[in-house]
Each structure stands twice: as C-alpha cells, then as structure tokens.
Amino acid sequence: MLIHDYFPHARRLWDRGELIVGPFLAVRRLAREGWPIDVVPLGELPWPTKLGRKVTSLAVVLGHSRGT
C-alpha cells in the first residue's frame, strides 16, 4: 500500500513546511501491536519534488506472514 505524509522517525524532510506525524505514529503503533508490517520510505527520487529537493514523504507499507 502506498501512503503519503510519512515522515520517518517523525523528523522533517524539508527545512520548511509542516511536520505531520500521524502516519508514522499509526504505523509504529500497529507494529508494536504485532501487525506484520514494514514501511519502506521512498526517500530521494531522481526528480525535484518539493522546495527544490528530491525527497518525498511517500512510503510503501508491506505486509508479511506472521512468524517470518
């Protein structure tokens, strides 16, 4: 599943702009409750995104089988 506004470790990706911690906190809570998920932030892209940088707040949520 692709999500947006994911700020890894609840840290800003850009010098300016709003920090939205909800998606990070929700994923962290689900993981602590035992949901078999991982999040892979897309990080830096090969094209400019916001405020002259190449970083994005997009992330992919991956599910896996319990016990693996």
Image (cartoon, helix red, strand yellow):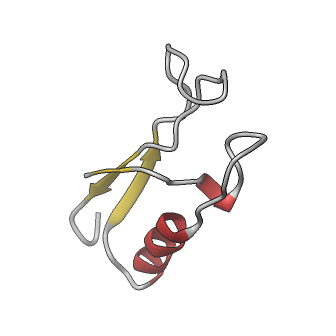
Q: Which of these two is toward me, 11 or 20?
A: 20
Extreme residue toward the right, this view: 15
Q: Is residue 32 above or below residue 19?
A: below
Q: Which of these two is toward me, 34 or 45?
A: 45
Give coordinates of residue 5: x percent, y percent: 49, 53
Is residue 27 toward the left or the right of residue 15 in the image? left
Give coordinates of residue 51: x percent, y percent: 66, 28
Give coordinates of residue 57: x percent, y percent: 51, 44
Q: In this view, does 39 lie above or below 53?
A: below
Residue at (71, 40) in percent of width and height: 14
Q: Which of these two is toward me, 65 or 40?
A: 40
Residue 38 placement: quadrant: bottom left
Residue at (37, 81) in percent of width and height: 34
Which quadrant does the C terminus fall into? bottom left
Residue 64 placement: quadrant: bottom left
Residue at (25, 52) in percent of width and height: 1
Q: In this view, does 57 lie above or below 8?
A: above
